[in-house]
Image: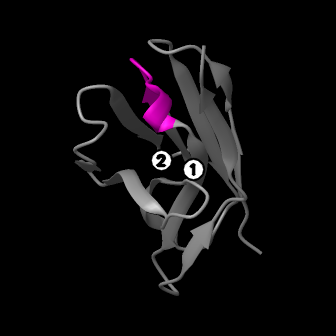
Amino acid sequence: QVQLVESGGGLVQPGGSLKLSCAASEIRFGFNTMGWYRQVPGKERELVATISGGSTNIADSVKGRFTISRDYVKNMVYLQMNGLIPEDTAVYYCYAEGIWPRMDYWGKGTLVTVSS
């Protein structure tokens, strides 16, 4: 059973920083894409950032403020969030796509609240 466990969420003031971490349990053939999505109550889950091989995909709303990185040996993915604004408040979910079988895995989410 693949598990993704997020950590690092919390309350931060506008302009502050947080770093989210996601630890994925081992999977036989590894993961292709890993990344982060976020969701606000009443809205659809939206992509924040993904990383696959040497390529990253960053949402326009966070470009220049958020950075995604990955440790392929430890099966971990990180999201460094700088210059946080209240609109970044959401539950952040870790995502991973298994290479084989091609399945999507999700963490339970970690809450990020940006407020003064």
Residue at x 67%, y 61% (from the top left corner): 26
Say if residue 36 shows up in the picture.
yes
Real-space Cα separation, disc 1 to disc 2, in angstroms: 5 Å
- Mark 1 Cα shell of 10 Å, populated few (<14), some (14-19), many (≥20): some
- Mark 2 Cα shell of 10 Å, populated few (<14), some (14-19), many (≥20): few
Vertical relation: 102 (above or below) 55: below
**Circle 1: residue type:** Asn
Magenta stretch bounds:
80-88
Pick the quarter of the image with the C terminus.
Answer: top right
Residue nearest the observer in this picture, 44 or 79: 44
For residue 82: magenta? yes
Residue nearest the observer in this picture, 33 or 60: 60
Vertical relation: 65 (above or below) 73: above
Q: Where is residue 91 in the image (x, y as percent from the top left)?
A: 62, 48
For residue 3: magenta? no
Describe residue 21's horizontal placement relative to residue 14 as left or right.
right
Vertical relation: 109 (above or below) 12: below
Residue at x 45%, y 53% (from the top left corner): 35
Residue at x 60%, y 71% (from the top left corner): 105
Vertical relation: 111 (above or below) 12: below
Q: Where is residue 94 in the image (x, y as percent from the top left)?
A: 57, 54
Q: Mark 2 points at which residue?
A: 72
Say if residue 74 shows up in the picture.
no
Residue at x 38%, y 38% (from the top left corner): 68
Residue nearest the observer in this picture, 80 or 112: 112
Pick the quarter of the image with the N terminus.
Answer: bottom right
